[in-house]
Amino acid sequence: MKLKNFYREFGKRLKQLRLQANMSQEELAEQVGVATKTVSYWENAHNPVTLSKIPLIAEALNVPVYKLFVFLETDEQVADKDYITLLQAKTGKELEVLFNIIQEFQKIKH
């Protein structure tokens, strides 16, 4: 998956989770502290999400952070052990992006 495709898949996932939470773009924007247009840009892969906003998005949507990065077209009831299989199927560049995100999370102090 190329980085551009990663952003597109992230945007689709964000929209899916937002709709599952019965939340409008405006409501999510307000909870995360950004403009509504910013949420639209994220969902449509026009702009990548800022790493510092990811924990806020997850909190607003009431999901663990990793759920933002599970790009499944199938049922949401995948067991946690299946995430290991999903990660093993990722390419080196995809894993590099995910590990960079994790490193940035570790830098964020609550």
Image (cartoon, helix red, strand yellow):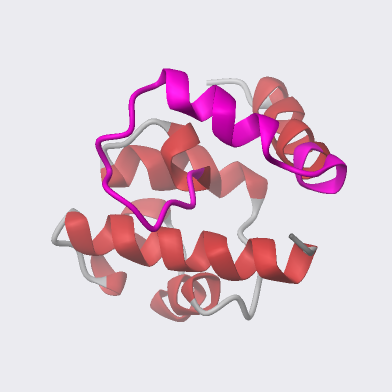
Residue drawn at x 79%, y 64% as measured from the top left: 2
Residue drawn at x 18%, y 53% as measured from the top left: 21
Above or below, 90 against 13 in this view is above
Number of marks:
0
Residue 37: say if magenta. Answer: no
Q: Position of residue 76 (x, y in %)?
A: 27, 43
Given residues 47 and 86, the one toward you in this image is 86
Residue drawn at x 53%, y 45% as measured from the top left: 69
Given residues 33 and 59, the one toward you in this image is 59
Q: Position of residue 89 (x, y in %)?
A: 67, 38
Q: Can residue 93 be seen by looking at this rendering?
A: yes
Q: Is residue 91 left or right of residue 14?
A: right
Q: Position of residue 88 (x, y in %)?
A: 68, 30
Given residues 107 and 2, the one toward you in this image is 2
Q: Position of residue 81 (x, y in %)?
A: 44, 18
Which quarter of the figure is the N terminus placed in? bottom right
Residue drawn at x 76%, y 31% as measured from the top left: 99
Q: Is residue 64 left or right of residue 96?
A: left
Residue 72: say if magenta. Answer: yes
Q: Is residue 39 left or right of residue 2?
A: left
Above or below, 69 against 110 in this view is below
Q: Is residue 5 left or right of residue 20?
A: right
Above or below, 103 against 60 in this view is above
Magenta span of residues:
70-95
Outermost residue toward the left in this view: 22
Q: Can residue 48 be seen by looking at this rendering?
A: no
Residue 91, picture quadrant? top right
